[in-house]
Image: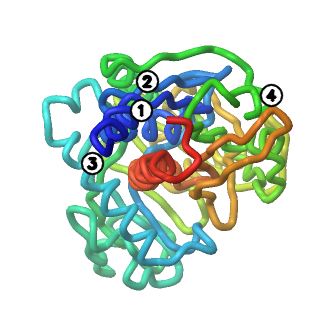
Amino acid sequence: MALSFTMKMAKANIGIVGAGIIGLSTALNIQKRLPSAKVTIYADRFDNETTSHGAGGLFRPNVEHLLGVDPDTVTRWSVEGFKFYSSLASSPEAATSGQMIMPGYVFSNTPVKDPLYKRLVYSFRELTAIELQKLQVDYKYGYQVTTVITYVPVFLPWLMVKFKDNGGRVEKRTVKSLEEFVGVHDMVVNCSGFRSRDLVGDKSVYPVRGHLIRIKAPWIKYWIYTEDSAYIIPGYDEVSIGGIRQKDNFNLEIDPKDTEGIKERCYKLWPSLKEAPVLREWVDLRPHRDPLRLEQQVIQYPSGPLKVVHNYGHGALGITLAWGTSIDAANLVVEGLTQPGSKL
């Protein structure tokens, strides 16, 4: 009997809503836990249409931007993420997965005291006054940090290929309600990000509008991040500069004032960027929730109950925390399938 149940669980039928970094990472981790399961991703936005596509990809976790989550849990998620990204960065897969080991600088006018990422990254040290003077930056404190950068325009397609190679299925579709999956899937994982406001009525998800500019600056071989939210992050063949954090701003159009503000801050930080041609700009709404939602739920619809695992609300830490939270989401799927009331 137990063996029969285990075999049925392995062949579970699971649906995932959302094809951004959270949805794809969750899908791969479910396939890892349940190799024989049928896993289908539903989304109406893929690859460069997703919010994830515009992320800078700098691995630099901090507790301050993740309210309501126990610091030990954030640390565990971050450890799993760095283990995954760093292993890719030092492997032949890096040529197609998008990870790069890269040194950079953090600048601020207040001291950075024992940040979470200090214990994870390859190196972390405070710059001397002489080094700050040589770098010609207008900040009191500076830190040299070597970490992993994930170039998301390459990483998202890589994840999708892995998912499909493992037998995963994809359906382009606008999901209007999770009730559509009652009687269709044994379990549904909601990775819909900002869409969860409408999909499951979660109005605690709020937008933090982001804006970055991708430029052609092949001479930049290092990243920079400041306390003023000015950043310079190299990718494969382009550099991202930004950025902004505008809470509760729903505007998806490029605002020329924001564009000029980003250029002004980044050009002041590194004047040679003025010579770099602009390739394109990106604006989207990062889905924030305090705390991010990672939990099981059985939703009672008129057509019947539906087992759901939620994994959304990561905001600006989506790339950093995606792998760690997706491991937990996959564990919750397995746990939920074994609970009484499962259709298996």
Q: Nearer the viewer, mark 4 or mark 2?
A: 2
Circle 4 sits in a helix, a strand or a loop, which is it? loop
Circle 2 sits in a helix, a strand or a loop, which is it? strand
Circle 1 sits in a helix, a strand or a loop, which is it? loop
Q: Nearer the viewer, mark 3 or mark 2?
A: 2
Name the quadrant of the N terminus. Answer: top left
Q: Nearer the viewer, mark 1 or mark 4?
A: 4
Q: Which residue is mark 3?
A: 84
Q: Which residue is mark 2?
A: 38
Which sits earlier in the primary sequence, circle 1 or circle 4?
Answer: 4
Q: Quadrant of residue 236?
A: top left
- Mark 2 Cα-neighbour bin, 10 Å: few <14, some 14–19, many ≥20: some
Identify the residue at image location x=61%, y=65%.
228
Position above or below: 199 against 92: below
Q: Which mark is residue 176?
A: 4
The residue type indicated by label 3 comes to Phe
The residue type indicated by label 2 comes to Lys
Tell me how far mark 2 sits from mark 1, CA to CA: 44 Å
Question: Is residue 162 at all visible to an observer of this figure?
Answer: yes
Which sits earlier in the primary sequence, circle 3 or circle 4?
Answer: 3
